[in-house]
Amino acid sequence: MNKFTCVADLGPLDRALAEAADIKRNRFAYTGLGRNRTLLMIFFNSSLRTRLSTQKAAMNLGMNVMVLDVNQGAWKLETERGVIMDGDKAEHLLEAIPVMGSYCDIIGVRSFAGLKDRDEDYEERVISQFIRYSGRPVFSMEAATRHPLQSFADLITIEEFKTKPRPKVVLTWAPHPKALPQAVANSFAEWMNATDYDFVITHPHGYELDPAFTGGARVEYDQRRAFEGADFIYAKNWSAYMAPNYGKVLSTDRDWTVDAAKMALTDNARFMHCLPVRRNMIVTDDVIESERSIVIPEAANREISAQVVIKRMLEGLPH
Ligand code: AN0
Ligand code: CP
């Protein structure tokens, strides 16, 4: 595998899930694979889970790992071509990328949406330049429009916890004080559409996502009705996608917070969130602490999803 940015890059999901289960049974079965190989993880944005789980996955495979926080200690990078660089940016991405590629075998990149220019974000300019110019396999650690390692971990988690073959999975918008990207929601929708689950999205009017990701998924504007009979509640905030409000917070209405009364409408659903989560905005303390909450095993599966992807990239490297 040479790139991992979306569900299609993983091929058949049943095979990927079997590989994930195999790795989970013995995550040290392939420690020889990464010998003398180096993973470079590049962060343009903050992270707790992605940083730790991806590094752990690479170490499980016997790799060396280097981590660069671009905004802490590296030169500030210009990302646009044609700019007269007389400002505060000392280096261009077009030199930085091949230089970084020359020190490693595989690259992971985190680069969030700027939420100012929708076309720029949805063209995925940063990660596509890494794919084009690094000369290395590149995987997304959350790019502008998708967070595929998260969605893969979410899928593994649902498969582990589901009690019926075709569970009802509900993606619900929930309030947050700051503007967040659509990446986690887009990606989750894309992955759920690749399964045969009963998938429903609920959000206030104005929070419609890009149909390129949601496809034919059912949208129910009444959150309580969407929750009826659900087996999994997947909460996430995102800012508006639709013009002219792209990147804006249209509502912080706490009537959309996931609480125990709403969870009582479900079929004893499991509660999921990718984390980090703002308590009593997205979800109440009692719901996230309840025995139905699976946010911790969900986060733990990030190590497994990352390990499947890095393993496949290592297997594809020339000897
Ligand atoms: C980020 C987001 O919503 O994309 C990362 C989530 C994994 N969340 C925040 O910035 C709070
Ligand atoms: N879920 C997730 O990607 O968390 P981090 O932003 O902490 O990496």
Image (cartoon, rainbow, N blue to C red):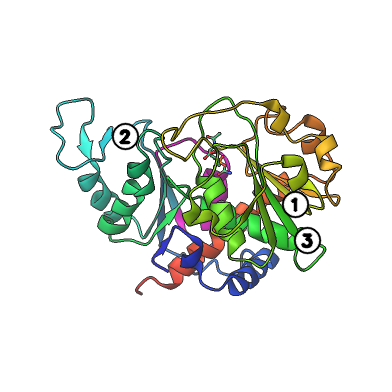
Residue that label 1 marks: 232
Residue positioned 72% across, 63% down in the render:
159
Task: Indicate the position of residue 13 as horizontal and vertical percent values.
Answer: 59, 70
Residue 295 relative to residue 10: left or right: right
Q: CA distance from mark 2 to mark 1?
A: 41 Å
Q: Amino acid at mark 3?
A: Lys
Rendered image quadrant of residue 205: top right
- Asked whether residue 60 appears in the rendered view, the answer is no
Mark 1 element type: strand
Residue at x-position 36% and y-position 60% = 105
Q: Is residue 59 magenta?
A: yes
Q: Quadrant of the N terminus?
A: bottom left
The label nearer to you, 3 versus 1, is 1
C-alpha distance separating marks 3 and 1: 8 Å
Residue 123's place in the image compared with 197, above or below, is: above
Quadrant into which the C terminus falls? bottom left
**Residue nearer the viewer, 27 or 272:** 272
Residue at horizontal 28%, vertical 61%? 135
- The stretch of residues the image draws in magenta is 43-64
Q: Which three-letter amino acid code belongs to the residue tagged 2?
A: Ala
Q: Secondary structure at mark 3?
A: loop
The image shows residue 155, relative to residue 49, as above or below, that is below
Residue assigned mark 3: 162
Label pair 3/1, CB-CB below 8 angstroms = yes
Q: Position of residue 217 (x, y in %)?
A: 61, 57
> In this figure, which residue is indicated by the disc labeled 2?
74
Q: Who comes first in sequence, dot 3 or dot 1?
A: 3
Ligand 1 quadrant assignment: top right
